[in-house]
Image (cartoon, rainbow, N blue to C red):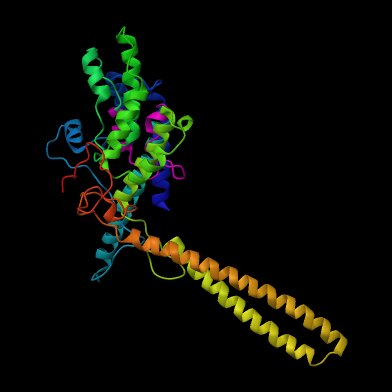
Amino acid sequence: MDFIVAKQTAMATCIEHKGIVVGLQSSDYTTSQFKAFKKSILQVLRYCDHVHLVLVEAEYRQYMNDAGVVIPTPTDPGTSPNFTGLTDLAQIEHSKAIFNANKIAYYAQEGVSDAIKNIISTNVPESILSALQDEDHGFANVTALEMMTAIGDVATDNEAFSVAEMLQQYRTMPDLEANEPLGNHFHKAEKLAKKLSTETPNPVPNHGALQVELLAHIKAHGGYKDDVDVWEVKPPADRSWDDFKSFFKASDKKRRLLLKHGVSSQSSPFGANNVTDNEIDVKISTKVAAGLAQITKVVESSLDEALATVPTSTSNRITSSTAAATKRIEELTQEVEKLKKENGRNSRSHERQRKMNKQCPHCNRWHPYIAEEKCYGHPNFSGEVPSGWKKADP
C-alpha cells in the first residue's frame, strides 16, 4: 500500500543522512555541545521535511521565520474514507484522494519519528535517556521532542560557575511535581559533583550527605510513603548511593505512571473492566471448585454403574479405589476453599485501594496505595509527620 511505502521511504531518508549527526560522546557535555548535536539532528530532519518533531512551537516559528505558522500534526484518518452524504462520483473521488493524502502524510511522519528517535538514542550516552526508556517498549511511547528536552536539561553552561553557585545547585532539592524525572536530577547532581571536584581544593560534599537530604525531601512529599518505608528497613549494605538512585528512580517512574494514566485498568475475560488480579483469582478458584464438584458427581455416577455390573471381588477393589479418589478430591476442595478465603482478604485490601483512586482531599496528592486515614494531612492521623511536609497546592 502507498502509505506503507511512504513510511519506509521516510525512514530510509533519515537513516541515509544519519552520518551528519554530531554525537555526544560523554555524559559530561556543555550547552554548546548540545546545541551542535541538536543542529545536526535538525539537518537530518530537514531532508525529511519534519524539523517540527524536535521543536516547540516558538522554536518552530523562529526556524520557519513565520510568526503565524502552526506545527503540523497529521493524525491517522482511519481505515477507509467517509463517503456519507456524497452522491456525485467526482466528490467521492475527491474525498478518496484527500483520505489517501492524509494517510500518507501520517505514516510518513511516523516513519521519520521512529528513525530519528533511533538516531538520537544511538548518539548519546545510554544513561542520559535511561529515565525515559521503558524496559519492554524502549522509546515507543516517548516523542523525539521529549528525548531532546531531556538531553538538553542535563547540559552544563559553558561559562564556569562560581563554587558557591555550583554548591547551591548541588544541594537544590528537585521539584517532585514537575515533569522532569527524578533520574535526571541524580544525573545533574553527579555532574556537578564531578565539576566541583576539579574546581575546589576542599573536599566536595559526598553523595551520602545529599542522599540524606534527598530522602528527607522525598519523605516529606508524601507520595512515596510505601517505598520510603521499604527503603528505610533495608540493611546498610543495600543503601548505597547507587542503590538509592536505582530504587527511587523506579519509585518515581511508578508514581508518575499512576499520575499520567490514573489507576491501571484492564479488560478481563471474567467480567467488566477494572478487575483486579485478586478478583480474577477468586473467579478462577470458584470455577475450579465447581469443576471439582462436577467431576466428583460424574465419577461417582460412573462408578455406581460399573459396580452394578462387576463381580463382588472386583467391586471391593473398585470401592477401595473410589474411597481413595474421593478423599483426594475432598482434599483438593479444601485447598480451593483456603485459596478463596485468602483471595477474599486480598480483594478487600484492593477494595480499600480502589477507594483512593482519586486525589486525596487532605494533601491534594495521588496516593492510591495509601489509605486516606493514613495520609499525613488527615485530621485524625496519629503518626509522626515528616519534617518539612506540607499540603500540596490544589
Q: Is residue 129 above or below residue 268?
A: above
Q: Is residue 273 visible?
A: yes
Residue 248 placed where, x, y %?
37, 37
Residue 52, quarter of picture: top left
The tally of labels here is 0
Q: Residue furthest front?
A: 382
Residue nearer the viewer, 137 or 256: 256
- Residue 105 relative to residue 303: left or right: left
Residue 180, quarter of picture: top left
Residue nearer the viewer, 264 or 1: 264
Q: Which residues are magenta?
A: 124-153
Q: Is residue 142 magenta?
A: yes
Residue 169 placed where, x, y %?
24, 23
For image coordinates 32% across by 49% down, the residue present is 106
Residue nearer the viewer, 47 or 156: 156
Residue nearer the viewer, 5 or 297: 297
Residue 326 placed where, x, y %?
69, 78
